[in-house]
Amino acid sequence: MCTLALLGLAGTALSAGGALVEGQQQKQMADYQAKAYEQQALADAQSTAFEQSQERHKQDLLQAQARAQAGASGVGMAGSPTEVLAANARQGQLDLDAMLYGSQLRQNNLNSQAAISRFSGKQAVTASIFNAGSALVGGLSKIYDPAKSQTSSMAVGTAPTRSVIFGSSPLRAAWAGNT
């Protein structure tokens, strides 16, 4: 009986330990996912900075070409050509701002996903603690159940010590000494 109790206790301990380990593993996966989201946000910021630089360079070239064409045509830079160049510059800046805004939205989304992932990891650890506690309480209650303990001790006290068995059923007889 003691061996069964020890086996039950060992099983309960393994079950509780397994629940705790599972929670830690889920937290590690959530932290890894959060880092991946943060790296994606950083990569997006770097990519957008590069694209903005390329766009700014392209706009500068277009502005220079427009000034050169206006000068080559003999038109002075005052009046309409200046207004066109200024309008082009404003539109170019709006394009750059739109690129930056889109990048910031994507970065915010990725950083939010990282925060959610970390939160779910913390929740998994908390849940694993409750699962481990439940396994301990459930396992310990199965090891020692007073109702089962009394029933089994009564059964041991009333069980016959000798019997004659014919086929698959015991036959109790006075001559066998087990009445």
Image: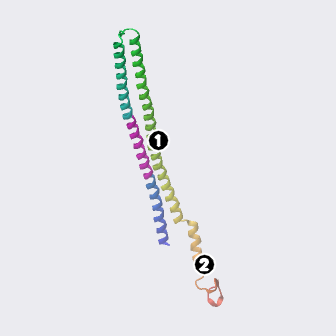
Q: CA distance from mark 1 to mark 2?
A: 62 Å
Secondary structure of residue under mark 1: helix
Please identify the quadrant where the C terminus is shown.
bottom right
| Residue under numbered circle 1 | 116
Along the viewing direction, whichever of 175 and 40 lies nearer the viewer? 40
Amino acid identity at mark 2: Thr
Residue 129 appears at what percent x and percent y? 47, 52
Residue 74 appears at what percent x and percent y? 35, 10
Amino acid identity at mark 1: Ile
Residue drawn at 43 percent across, 25 percent down = 95
Residue drawn at 49 percent across, 66 percent down = 8
| Residue under numbered circle 2 | 158
Along the viewing direction, whichever of 122 and 8 lies nearer the viewer? 122
Along the viewing direction, whichever of 27 and 171 lies nearer the viewer? 27
Magenta stretch, overall SS? helix
Q: Residues within 10 Å of mark 1 (few under 14, many from 20)?
A: some
- Residue span colored magenta: 24-44
Along the viewing direction, whichever of 165 and 87 lies nearer the viewer? 87
